[in-house]
Amino acid sequence: MGDVDYSPQDKVHPPKPRSPYGVSKVASRFLTKVYRESYDIFAVHGILFNHEGVRRGEEFVTRKITKGVAAIKSAIDQGKEFSPLLLGNVDSKRDWSDSEDFMEGIWLMMNQDTPKEYILSSNETHTVREFVSLAFQEAGIPGVWSGEGLDEKFKIYQENKILAAISEEFYRPCEVNILHGDSNPIREELGWKPKYSFQNLVSRMVQNDINSL
């Protein structure tokens, strides 16, 4: 994950990592290239944009949102008080896909006749704000955003109950404002295409966390 020079980002976009995690991904890309070209190993490197699912770790913002939504829904259903979901930069844009779709893409990459690098992505972007709104909507809790900056709040529609709020604590030291992949080559050459839309993804994650409670 890093800075971007243009969108959507294709395979020739220069790597510009902004975190140790991002640096490790760049290193793995070039290590794969070395082993493929120097040792004649069938080694494939996939550039996978954000992929989520019901098994996503709770430390990631998408799962944090869907678990938080499930907990708030449970509290509302029981007539209990609840604490709002606290988030960082809700303007961040990400290219989110369902991890099940990516597993099919990886299988296709590993079963090529000749190893070739591909990007897997949904080819669209959505903000964290959109993810939050849709997650609450999927739980049957319509809401509306109001305010600006650190004072921005997401409240139950026509009520004053705060569902989500902004906290400076969750801002990253080096924010990545947009990630937007170009997966057209693998769609055209290997016939891959995602089965799940952004709304499908959010719905599956929310319903899974509601059922888990």
Image (spheres, rainbow, N blue to C red):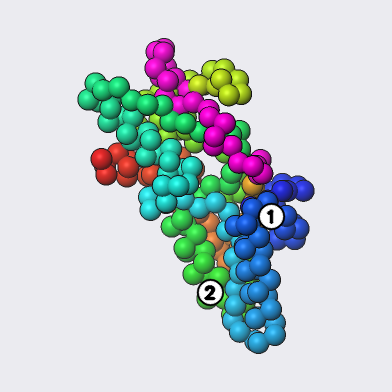
Considering every residue shown, the one lying at the far left of the view is: 78
Name which quarter of the figure residue 48 lies in. Answer: bottom right
**Residue for point 37% across, 26% down:** 83
Residue that carries the numbered disc 1 in the rendered image: 17
- Say if mark 2 contacts mark 1, CB within 8 Å: no
Considering every residue shown, the one lying at the far front of the view is: 169
For mark 1, give the secondary structure: loop
**Residue for point 42% across, 51% down:** 57
**Numbered mark located on residue 36 in the image:** none
Mark nearest the camera among 2 and 1 is: 1
How far apart in space, not on screen, are marks 2 and 1 (Cα)?
26 Å
Return the disc, 2 or 1, that comes first in the chain's sequence: 1
**Placement of the C terminus among the 4 image quadrants:** top left
**Percent position (x, y) of residue 121?**
58, 53
**Percent position (x, y) of residue 185?**
65, 61
* Amino acid type indicated by mark 2: Met
Of 128 and 6, nearer the camera is 128
Tell me if 58 is positioned left or right of 73 in this view: right
Residue that carries the numbered disc 2 in the rendered image: 110
Query: What segment carries the magenta color?
Result: 154-178
**Residue for point 56% across, 70% down:** 109
Tell me if 5 is positioned left or right of 168 in this view: right
